[in-house]
């Protein structure tokens, strides 16, 4: 048990659908992250929240919309996705996002397939 | 640009030793992390180096040379359960992790 949970674990959606990914951390951390992991590519940081405030948005297309209602919950709202958006979406948390020792704890990920 | 390089795949024998290298070029340096990721699972933390030298933790050790932009992860007494991907990541000047693509380690009996 990593202390970070994600739902759903698997998601198949059409390009016109709207869906949301959910992440919850039980570690008392202040920072949460969304990453995209594609096969044989480095983890791509999408969004960072620190104390519920978005601190990073790495040029992510607007079809991905994050929401962080509190320090324990993070959502990724999806709409009009493209097939190239199919990937593993990982959520992570850490004590803070602006310190040297920034060990991140990951959830199991959501395997997304866009048809 | 920022870049992390590590081999795509390595093969080793059960009981042996393997060294996985990582070289990096980043804007600033606030430490280097190694993570392990089994297929279909979350990455899990293995080690953190911020000063030059070797950090040992059981069967796993991690080395850092900041002047060379180089690190390695050393795995001893390999077990079948060590078959996984090993991810190198550097914390840059903004404390964001820059990730390598990972090294898939295959352990053979």
Image: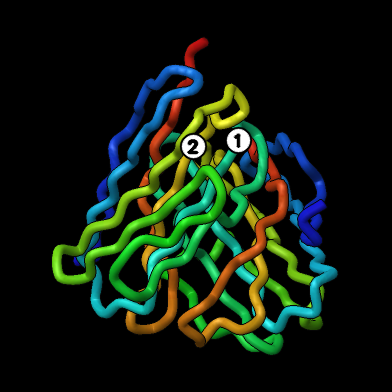
Q: Is residue A59 visible?
A: no
Quarter of the view holding residue A16: top right
Q: Position of residue B93 (x, y in %)?
A: 33, 83
- Secondary structure of the residue carrying tag 2 is strand
Which label belongs to residue A67?
none
Q: Is residue B75 above or below residue B30?
A: above
Callout 1: few (<14), some (14-19), or many (20+) C-alpha neighbours within 10 Å?
some
Marked residue nearer the N-terminal end (2 or 1): 1
Asked if badges 2 and 1 are on one and the same chain, I answer yes
* Residue marked by disc 2: B85
Gap between marks 2 and 1, in whole Å?
6 Å
Q: Position of residue B41 (x, y in %)?
A: 67, 40
Residues under numbered marks 2 and 1 in contact, where contact means CB atoms less than 8 Å apart: yes
Q: Is residue B9 visible?
A: yes
Q: Chain of mark 1?
A: B
Nearer to the camera, B73 or A66: B73
Q: Residue at x 57, y 26 (%)?
A: B79
Q: Residue at x 46, y 55 (%)?
A: B34
Q: Position of residue A7 (x, y in %)?
A: 81, 50
Nearer to the camera, A47 or B87: B87
Q: Residue at x 52, y 10 (%)?
A: B109
């Amino acid at each position: 048990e990593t202390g970070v949970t994600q739902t759903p674990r698997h998601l198949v959606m059409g390009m016109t659908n709207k869906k949301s990914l959910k992440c919850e951390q039980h570690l008392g951390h202040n920072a949460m992250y969304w990453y995209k992991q594609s096969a044989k590519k480095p983890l791509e940081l999408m969004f960072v929240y620190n104390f519920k405030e978005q601190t990073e948005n790495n040029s992510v297309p607007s079809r991905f919309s994050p929401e962080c209602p509190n320090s324990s919950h993070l959502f990724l709202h999806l709409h009009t996705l493209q097939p190239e958006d199919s990937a593993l979406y990982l959520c992570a948390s850490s004590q803070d996002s602006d310190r040297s020792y920034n060990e991140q704890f990951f959830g199991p990920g959501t395997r997304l397939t866009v048809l | 640009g920022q870049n992390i390089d590590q081999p795509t795949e390595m093969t080793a024998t059960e009981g042996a030793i393997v060294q996985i290298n990582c070289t990096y070029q980043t804007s600033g340096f606030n430490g280097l992390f190694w993570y392990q990721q089994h297929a279909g699972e979350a990455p899990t933390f293995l080690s953190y180096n911020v000063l030059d030298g070797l950090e040992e933790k059981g069967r796993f050790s991690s080395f850092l040379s900041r002047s060379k932009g180089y690190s390695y992860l050393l795995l001893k007494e390999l077990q079948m359960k060590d078959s996984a991907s090993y991810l190198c990541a550097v914390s840059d000047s903004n404390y964001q992790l820059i990730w390598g693509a990972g090294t898939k380690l295959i352990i053979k009996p």
